[in-house]
Amino acid sequence: MMKPKVFVTRHLPEAAMQKLQSACEVEIWDEEFPPPYDLIVEKVADKAGLLCLLTDQIDVNLMAAAPNLKVISQVAVGFDNIDVVAATKRGIAVGNTPGVLTDATADFAFTLLMAAARRVGEAIDYVRDGKWETWGLTLLLGQEIHAATLGIVGLGRIGRAMAKRARGFNMKVIYHSRSRKPELEEMLGVEYRELDDLLREADYISLHLNLSDETRGLFDARAFSLMKPNAILINTARGPIVDSEALYLALKTGQIAYAALDVTDPEPLPVNDKLLTLPNLIVVPHIASATVASRTQMSQMAVRNLIAGVHGEKLPFPVNAV
Ligand code: DGY
């Protein structure tokens, strides 16, 4: 029997690749950089399945060029690069990889919180630049973490995991989400706030939202104007939730104290971007879920979604109902 044909837009860990090859006829773009959009369009023309990353733009035109496409399997929990509405209209199943990266991502969001609070990036540069000549009473002073207030925006899986870490550090945790979640408040020890109130009250603000029309640019000049001068912003969600120009001005003028970004807009952030001239900013290259265990499991889940989809079965980790 002929195996279903699939296109894979980037190298996968060996075990996931083997499983996929045993079930499908696999064509892979095995380069370090993403395949050009036009190449994906060409490749999916005769494929039943597409396994993609968040760097691939999967839009309605691409789907129109793929008459046999049954499934789009994303190796990530976020899927804002995929037009899910268009996929659903065409009866194409979309899958993602929730859950297995929750703890790794929350661990890393907390790592960024601590690194910004205690100015770890600046301190490393200070030593490497040969500036460490004596112990100083006021050298590289940072902010307290314990007993400070963390504002979590978005109380999904990763937001909740972040709340648990913060409670372990004896922080007060407040949250905002589209709908209030009374059942979680007692369990996690968190209090609900309207977004503006959270912005006014929090010492640390950590973003755990999906990117959507509603959340794009949510952190704009107005939002920064409400935040405390000691506020530290942590973004491990999606870059465009924060208006980069407004963030630059807020950090430059001392409207807020610090920011730590795992995600940026644009992404990657060009090396000559003016954000990178700021001393009170940490930027890392979208690595919050980058542990061996998380990325291995994400790949395996994506392969399971792809195999189920090409066989017309319900995806184990579905995004849409088709
Ligand atoms: C995701 O899964 O959406 C992250 O951004 C990358 O792991």
Image (cartoon, rainbow, N blue to C red):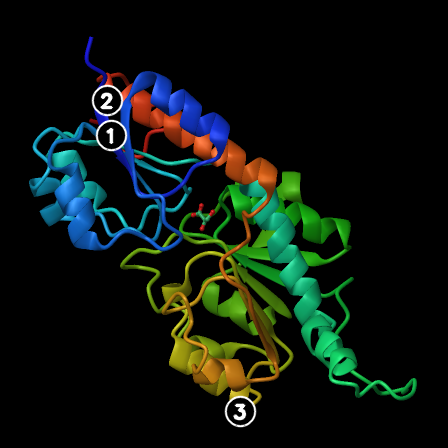
Element under label 2? helix
25 or 317, nearer to the observer: 25
Residue 310, label in figure: 2
Q: Earlier in the sequence, mark 3 or mark 1?
A: 1
Element under label 3? loop
In the figure, is residue 43 to the left or right of 95?
left
Q: Quadrant of residue 301?
A: top left
Residue 6, label in figure: 1
- Neighbour class for label 2 at 10 Å: few (<14), some, many (≥20)? many
Element under label 1? strand
Residue 210 in the image: x percent, y percent? 39, 52
75 or 119, nearer to the observer: 75
- Neighbour class for label 1 at 10 Å: few (<14), some, many (≥20)? many
Q: Which residue is mark 3?
A: 253
Label 3 is placed on what type of residue? Thr
208 or 271, nearer to the observer: 271
